[in-house]
């Protein structure tokens, strides 16, 4: 996959996925909850509140919602700055409301976690950090600066210092932990969704190539007959025009171009039949097809075919699925990219298993990512050397993820390790990928044919 295609799956504008209407609805819910809490506190618990300032604070959210509703279209998508400003407004409004109603002595101070957690799910890291710092600052200020909660009889409601310190600590830790947790989970979900989309695109592209091969084969077959007629007629005309050399040269040219068209159609037809009409092929043929695009890239790509000598079996005739060919092709490409001089593809089988080993004599997988191979968008801690060796790649692991996903769809189990160079005859360095299938999953037993001939009675 080209870098330009990868950038599609790394679009940082996640905030553009959020509609203004979504945040407006959430704010209406918050306003309704705030109004209900104030009414219950005053009517049922006889608390003395600064109702004028509290009403003005809640009214600010109401006005902001009305402003957003009437001035912008309902389905407006928010950019990063707009979403950050809206969430900062909500955070500051909640902080002011808590200041007027007892600060951290108010149990609803827990709600200060909500705007930060929401920001972590769709804003960039910088914006999330701004929200977190503002929230921590508000919590710190509310611990000592607030209007005390009092009952109508003048009794002050406040937590003991040890509980107040514990609540402050819990809120601060909660802001940090929940924002990091929400962001990590969201990023992984986005990466997995983008990688699966890339996998579907790769499989669809491979399927289109397969279908195109069938069209080419059909075209070659249909054009074969008229081309043979042209060849026959031109050959007869050539023998009858010995006395007219100027016309004989033209007929000879027609005959030569007909031969050329025949050769082109023959190669096209062979390629198309390989892709569409031969639904099954020997394992070696499938491996050579997968390795063919990378066989002329300056590295020695060697395919070794072996079998269980104790229990000899026929070479597997595997199904030529697009996901199998494309998955193997990606693995071979990765090996060729990092190999120094040689890539070994070793195939072995017995009555139960089919096993492939793809090894190269390169530097092997980095220790920092070997445990995460197959995870999309994995970045190395030190990518400078890798970028120098392969400037056209960004080292995100997307190709290996696509290979792993496609091959696992066919029933394969993949294992990534180092030590491939030992197989390639260059010591113990080098990457090694082992792909193993239960034989029946890609080499189903042959059918029983047409069955026994039974005479009519």
Image (cartoon, helix red, strand yellow):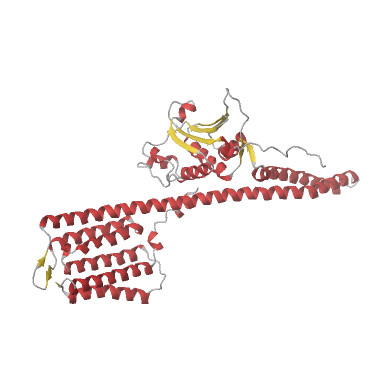
Whole-percent x, y for residue 287 in the image = 58, 36
The quadrant in which residue 368 appears is top left
Question: From the image, which quarter does the C terminus lie in?
Answer: top right
137 with respect to 421 (left or right): left
Whole-percent x, y for residue 163 in the image = 14, 56
Which residue is rendered at x = 31% and y = 69% of the image? Answer: 29
* In front of the other: 157 or 57: 157
Residue 193 drawn above or below residue 23: above
211 with respect to 124 (left or right): right
* In front of the other: 239 or 369: 369
Residue 50 drawn above or below residue 229: below
Which residue is rendered at x = 17% and y = 71% of the image? Answer: 45
Residue 428 drawn above or below residue 222: above
Residue farthest along the front direction in this orientation:
457
Whole-percent x, y for residue 107 in the image = 20, 62
446 with respect to 221 (left or right): left
């Amino acid at each position: 996959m080209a870098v330009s295609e990868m950038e599609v799956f790394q679009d940082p504008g996640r905030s553009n996925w959020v509609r203004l209407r979504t945040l407006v609805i959430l704010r209406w819910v918050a306003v309704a909850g705030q109004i209900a809490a104030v009414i219950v506190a005053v009517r049922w618990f006889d608390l003395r509140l600064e109702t004028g300032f509290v009403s003005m604070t809640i009214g600010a959210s109401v006005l902001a919602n009305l402003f957003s509703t009437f001035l912008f279209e309902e389905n407006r998508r928010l950019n990063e700055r707009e979403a950050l400003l809206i969430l900062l407004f909500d955070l500051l409004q909640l902080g002011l409301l808590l200041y007027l109603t007892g600060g951290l002595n108010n149990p609803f101070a827990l709600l200060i976690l909500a705007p930060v957690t929401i920001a972590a799910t769709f804003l960039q890291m910088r914006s999330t950090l701004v929200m977190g710092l503002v929230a921590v600052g508000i919590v710190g200020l509310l611990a000592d600066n607030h209007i005390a909660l009092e009952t109508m009889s003048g009794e002050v409601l406040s937590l003991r210092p040890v509980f107040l310190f514990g609540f402050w600590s819990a809120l601060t830790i909660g802001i940090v932990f929940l924002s990091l947790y929400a962001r990590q989970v969201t990023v992984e979900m986005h990466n997995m969704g983008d990688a699966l989309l890339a996998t579907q695109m790769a499989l669809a592209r491979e399927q289109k190539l397969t279908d195109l091969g069938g069209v080419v084969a059909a075209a070659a077959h249909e054009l074969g007959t008229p081309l043979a007629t042209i060849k026959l007629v031109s050959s007869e005309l050539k023998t009858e025009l010995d006395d007219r050399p100027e016309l004989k040269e033209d007929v000879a040219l027609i005959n030569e171009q007909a031969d050329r068209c025949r050769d082109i159609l023959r190669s096209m037809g062979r390629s198309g039949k390989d892709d569409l009409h031969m639904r099954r092929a020997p394992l070696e043929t499938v491996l050579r097809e997968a390795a063919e695009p990378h066989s002329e890239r300056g590295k020695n790509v060697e395919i070794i075919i072996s079998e269980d000598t104790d229990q000899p079996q026929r070479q597997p005739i595997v199904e030529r699925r697009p996901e199998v060919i494309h998955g193997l092709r990606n693995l071979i490409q990765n090996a060729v990219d990092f190999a120094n001089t040689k890539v070994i593809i070793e195939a072995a089988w017995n009555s139960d298993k089919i096993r492939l080993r793809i090894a190269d004599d390169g530097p092997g997988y980095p220790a920092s990512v070997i445990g995460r191979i197959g995870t999309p968008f994995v970045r190395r801690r030190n990518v400078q050397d890798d970028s120098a060796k392969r400037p056209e790649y960004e080292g995100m692991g997307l190709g290996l993820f696509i290979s792993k996903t496609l091959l696992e769809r066919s029933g394969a189990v993949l294992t990534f390790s180092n030590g491939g160079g030992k197989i390639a005859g260059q010591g113990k360095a080098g990457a090694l990928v082992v792909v193993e299938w239960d034989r029946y999953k890609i080499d189903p037993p042959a059918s029983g044919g047409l069955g026994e001939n039974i005479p009519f009675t």
